[in-house]
Image (cartoon, rainbow, N blue to C red):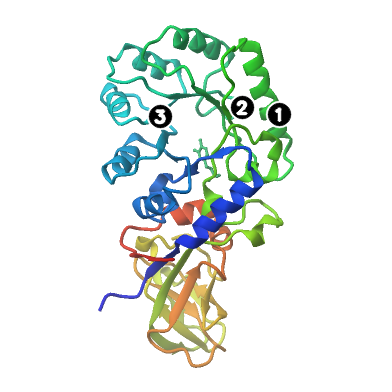
Amino acid sequence: MPRHTNAIIELDNIRHNYELCVSLAPESNNMAIIKADAYGHGLIDVARYLSSHVPAFGIAIIDEAVQLRQEGITNDLLVLQGCNRKEDILQASLQNIWLTIHSLEQLYLVLKTSLPNKIKIWLKLDTGMHRLGLNQQQFNQALSLVKDSTNIDKNFVISSHFSCAAELHHSETRRQFKQFKLMIEESGFEGELIRSHSNSSAIVGFPEANMEWNRPGIMLFGLPLFDQPHDSDLRLRPAMTFESEVTAIRDVEAGEYAGYGQNWVADKKTKIATVAVGYADGYPRHAKSGTPVLIRNQRAYLIGTVSMDLITVDITGIDNVKIGERVELWGNELSANEIAKFAGTIGYDLLSGLSPRVPRIYRN
Ligand SMILES: *Cc1c(COP(=O)(O)O)cnc(C)c1O
């Protein structure tokens, strides 16, 4: 018998969340971002399920795009980081994969590689994040280079990325958007305007930036989007439930401890359940004592250090807990965002960090 530590994936919830996105941005093309193994939900299963509902998929790196093509996905695909190697650009051209161009170096490489087909590109502007993207001068130069190139499809997209959209009404979001429009204006760009700036939190929290293309990621998987409660929280449905089971139960007396390093010591007689999950499964190593889990629909609390394959929780006061009892680590009833806070991180990190050791079980 395998242990019952699984991620249950409700594909219908992903579909529901995508449709919510479309209803909020009906004028935009909404590309489903499924990088990092679809935020831990399984790249190929999620792509197959969504393929007839979405115009395109976004992934971080070329390997993910090639994998999607190998598995027969025919939707348009955008590589969000673009490529820095000739052989990857050739792959993109051969397999009709769109490339982000975020630097002149990337653009030169596309221009000088001999390609079987024109490549569709997304020219990325740096509007403040200073991670990837062209500044005004580089953008102007890129436009003149692209105009004369036979390697590049003339209908390219102009894109950028928000740094603070998860903080509702942050002034930087408005400033970046203004700069984005200004950069396009200053360049004297004369082609058809196809633009993209918004990720999930911007689509919902800053709708005036919904343009020809949006790039929703985390909202498809149903996590709350903002640093504060928001109407959309209740309309999004978490797609992943991470669950495990109780594998041992014992009582300890006041003064006894649990786990590595004696980091938790009982202040009274305590009933401890050991649960078959650990950091090697993607349960966060830095989760603090007091992080909640759900057992028999009640909250129990992590005590002591997270081990590689096990955690210990205080189940004093929860009646009838048995070996094999189901434990919810995050999901419908317990947001991954809440757990993340106890570990000093964010929900994205927990979902995308779920280990390959954890079987994904699909329901729809
Ligand atoms: C990951 C990513 C997205 C999706 O962001 P979410 O916050 O998950 O919606 C959009 N655009 C780019 C460039 C990204 O890297």
Residue that mark 2 sits on: 128
Could you tell which of marks 2 and 3 lies nearer the N-terminus? 3
Say if residue 185 shows up in the picture: yes
Question: Which three-letter amino acid code belongs to the residue tagged 2?
Answer: Gly
- Coordinates of residue 118 in the picture (x, y in percent): 36, 19
Pick whichever, 266 or 116, lies toward us.
116
- Coordinates of residue 254 in the picture (x, y in percent): 52, 86
Secondary structure beneath label 1: helix
Residue that mark 3 sits on: 98
Q: CA distance from mark 1 to mark 3?
A: 28 Å
Question: Which three-letter amino acid code belongs to the residue tagged 3?
Answer: Trp
Could you tell which of marks 1 and 2 lies nearer the N-terminus? 2
Residue that mark 1 sits on: 175
Residue sitting at the far front: 52
Say if residue 345 shows up in the picture: no
Secondary structure beneath label 3: strand
Could you tell which of marks 1 and 3 lies nearer the N-terminus? 3
Question: Which three-letter amino acid code belongs to the residue tagged 1?
Answer: Arg
Quarter of the figure with residue 354: bottom left
Pick whichever, 215 or 226, lies toward us.
215
